[in-house]
Image (cartoon, grey):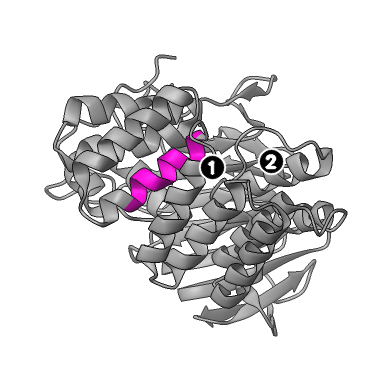
Amino acid sequence: MARKKNLNFKKLQFSIIQSSTRTFSFLFVLFLALLPTNTYAASCDQWVAEVISAEGVVESRRTGETRWQQVSLNETFCAGDMIRVLENSRAGLAFANQPLLRLDQNSTITLGEIKEESSGLTGMLKGAASLDLIKGVAHFFSRLPRNLEVRTGFVNAGVEGTEFLIAVDDTKTSITVFEGKVLAANSAGQLGLTSGQSAVTEKGKAPVLQTVVSPRDAVRWALYYPPVIYGSDPNVSINQAAQLLAVGRVDEAKALIQQTPQNSNALSLLSIIAVVENNKEKARNLADQAIAADPESSTPRIALSYAQQASFDLAGARQSLEKAVELEPNNALAQARLAEIYSSFGELDKALATAKKAAAIEPKLSRTQTVLAFANLTQIKTTEARSAFNKAIELN
């Protein structure tokens, strides 16, 4: 299938959900609003879901086929098609009627039909989407009322404008509602859930409420952990930990990091985890320890910049990044991160020049192309921005 030539608004929604740094989000909205939306041709009259993110091994099996094949970004799927996410992988889907779905590793779904309703002036489908979650974990964002139904082997979930999580294993289905309402129902009974509530359903039993102490921990796999290590660490476990963080496997990454807890790069990764977990003081302390462990490395200073920005210390973040670039001028991540900070200060020419430098150092890194795209966008260079965004998506 041919790849999309332009970004679309669903990618914007998804990138904002998964990213912990949103410096250019508003400009990105304005840019994307001007672009035409194209999609793959599907084998049905109306596709129901589109792949907007695929990290690791994500495969599909279309109706009538027997082979699983790797999915492509922007690929669209019809009712009856199956999608699975393998070990240390994750995926994102956007439905034609607007709900967004994140799939964790070891998850499999079968897409259902969208029941059409009046499309109004927008021409978009407004009916209810449906899917079967065969196994695994799915995280949903559905802001429109009654536009999503999820079926599992133990219970079905009817949704009314919400963010919620469903996990299915061999013995039960668990549902946690972060915002909105979900009706969990099967032949044995039903239970209405609202924001902050969780339920579990076992085979042949009605759904019952359960207490979850830290429900947000269940979606840590869906978060975005900014990269800080450029190149390879001599320690294999640190490289593996960085790769695991890139697909949200924070617990597995921590286990590897603990093998070399005093390593500067290891401490930098722990600092980034603390930033994403909104533990600002811990993040700064870990970054400071990382700098003390290797004062000549730029990696801990990149990590420190995120901790400083999380505490609204932009001047400190700028100082840390300028030092990082001074220490390692050819560190593409440091240059890209510095370009972001320059933009936050409104120094747009300096931001673009630094972003170009980062992309020249490492043109095949999604991070450098993304920053370059935003830097071009701030100067209304839409052609250059579009080109860099498309490169970033392909590389990612």
Residue drawn at point x = 38 percent, y = 71 percent: 312
Crowd class of label 2 (few under 14; some 14 to 19; many from 20; radius 10 Å)? some
Element type where label 1 sits in the image: helix
- In the rendered structure, the answer to whether residue 87 lies left or right of residue 392 reads right
Q: Quadrant of the N terminus?
A: top left
Of the numbered discs 2 and 1, the one sitting upstream in the chain is 2
Question: What is the magenta range?
Answer: 332-341
Find residue 210 and report its horizontal and vertical position in percent: 71, 83
Query: Label 1 belongs to which residue?
Result: 327
Residue placed farthest to the top in the image? Answer: 2
Nearer to the camera, 23 or 204 = 23
Query: Label 2 belongs to which residue?
Result: 243
Amino acid of disc 2: Gln
Residue drawn at point x = 62 percent, y = 42 percent: 229
Nearer to the camera, 393 or 198 = 393
Nearer to the camera, 82 or 271 = 271
Amino acid of disc 1: Leu
- In the rendered structure, the answer to whether residue 87 lies left or right of residue 366 reads right
Nearer to the camera, 228 or 133 = 228
Give the quadrant of residue 386: top left
Find residue 177 and report its horizontal and vertical position in percent: 54, 74
Residue drawn at point x = 67 percent, y = 40 percent: 89
Crowd class of label 1 (few under 14; some 14 to 19; many from 20; radius 10 Å)? some
Q: Answer whether residue 321 is visible to the viewer in this image.
A: yes
Give the quadrant of residue 232: top right
Q: Answer whether residue 114 is visible to the viewer in this image.
A: no
Find residue 112 and report its horizontal and vertical position in percent: 51, 43
* Eye-nearest disc, 2 or 1: 1
Find residue 242 and report its horizontal and vertical position in percent: 69, 45
